[in-house]
Image (cartoon, grey):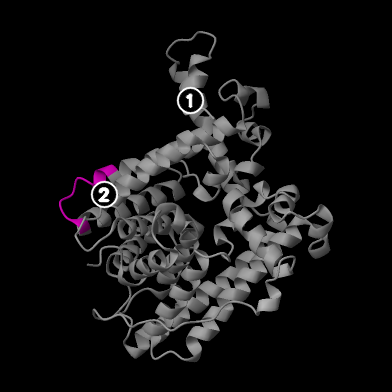
Amino acid sequence: MTTENPAVEVVSATPAARTPSRRYMARRDAIIASAIREMNRHGVRGMTLGDVAARLDLVPTGVIYYFRNKEDLAAAAFERSIGRIQELAEVAREHPTERERVQVFIDLFILLQQRIELGEAEPLAVFNDVRALNSESVNQAFVALFRTVRSLLDRRENRTRADLNGRAHLLINALTFVSAWIYTWRVEDYPRIGQRIASILLDGIPRGGNVPGVRFLDLQPSGDEVDEGSAEHFLRAATQLINDEGYHGASVDRISSKLNVTKGAFYHYNATKDDLVVACFQRTFDVLWRAIDAAESGGDDGLEIMHSLLQAVVQLQVGPAPLLRTSALSTVPEEIRDDLMFRLRQISIRLGSMLCDGIADGSIRPLDASITAQILTAGINAASELTWWQPGETPETGARLFVDAMVRGVIHP
């Protein structure tokens, strides 16, 4: 795969081979904006050049004139959005203290979301499928963004590289996940929401400095359910592939190949791929409800319950049996999306209720429970990629450091 910028390749391939005109660049920008909307709705694999062109009253060849193929267009769309967030982080980096830098980054990001909702700026690409594209130029751009965001945090003697990476990973994912839920609020309230997001990410959820230890929660099904060839074994493999490749990338052939089974074995458990996605989400919901019930069954207070819950689920995410990323909902067919979204909201509402219990018993400080629940959900999602950002660290230590950031905030000592 080439490491050159796809946009440069296309410009150099234009008939005149000269600096593109303002009209050319305006049309190219419009195509990228159309592609971002299609990617956010259907994922990279589900986006078609025909749908991108139709939004602009073009024929598909009109798009190909600017981008040779769908992959080049998707790469340009991701790079555009990554670059916009990078600009916000670079502005924030100029501020003197860690708290100010993170605060400004959050404020600028929410202001951008407000401008997007008002139609004053084009949407950002959702990064759910960024790994599925497997573009070296996009990966390099995202790593550059990650490093810039990480530079907002102070390097201290007691903060390992894995710790800083986990905090930066949480900060990026908490903000990019905002588009999944902020639209339910009035656009006039976005600055207020930004203040509450900053409070949660900066100072965490405990009331006071003490954070209790965690209880072990057994979330695994019984041993006979995870034997090779079992439904649980099948769903684990499918979940990992969907997390990596998105809905459209996880074909029946690829799932069967990953498990080294025939298509017949696939259809033994699921009539269609949609049935498989629903089954993967059902497994994920079952595990989350099992974690909630187990955490609440013996907890001392709301903070200990939430801490134990997060540790158990994040530990699962970095192990061999991860949960399906709820961000996968953005690319599943619309006919099954609404029901799955409803069931996810039930869990988010329950997390908010658990936070309210902690506020009532005094272990959790007064905060916006509904927004905190969304940030914790984003963290649980992000945990499935922790091993990518914490090379050389044991999964157990990486999970503990990440949960510390979720509970105590990204700038805790």
Q: Is residue 315 left or right of residue 339?
A: left
Give the residue type at disc 1: Ala
**Residue nearest the viewer, comparing 391 with 210:** 391
Give the percent coordinates (x, y) of residue 238: 67, 58
**Residue nearest the viewer, comparing 370 with 183:** 370
Q: Residues within 10 Å of mark 2 (few under 14, many from 20)?
A: some
Q: Residues within 10 Å of mark 1 (few under 14, many from 20)?
A: some
What is the quadrant of residue 161 in the picture?
A: bottom left
Please tell me whether mark 1 sits on a helix, a strand or a loop: helix
Give the percent coordinates (x, y) of residue 138: 47, 37
Which residue is painted at 40% across and 47% down in the image?
A: 115
Residue 370 in the magenta stretch? The answer is no
Which residue is painted at 46% across and 22% down in the image?
A: 8
Give the residue type at disc 2: Ser
**Residue nearest the viewer, comparing 76 with 132:** 132
- On screen, residue 155 above or below 201: above
Assign the N terminus to one quadrant of the image: top right
Q: Is residue 11 left or right of residue 289?
A: left
Point out the stretch of residues depicted in magenta: 90-98
Mark number displayed over residue 151: 2
Asked if residue 394 can be seen in this view, the reply is yes
Q: Is residue 320 left or right of residue 176?
A: right
Query: Which of the two discs, 1 and 2, sits closer to the camera?
Result: 2
- On screen, residue 103 above or below 282: above
Q: Which residue was labeled with disc 1?
A: 7
| Dot placed on the residue nearer the N-terminal end, 1 or 2 | 1
Which residue is painted at 36% across and 44% down in the image?
A: 145
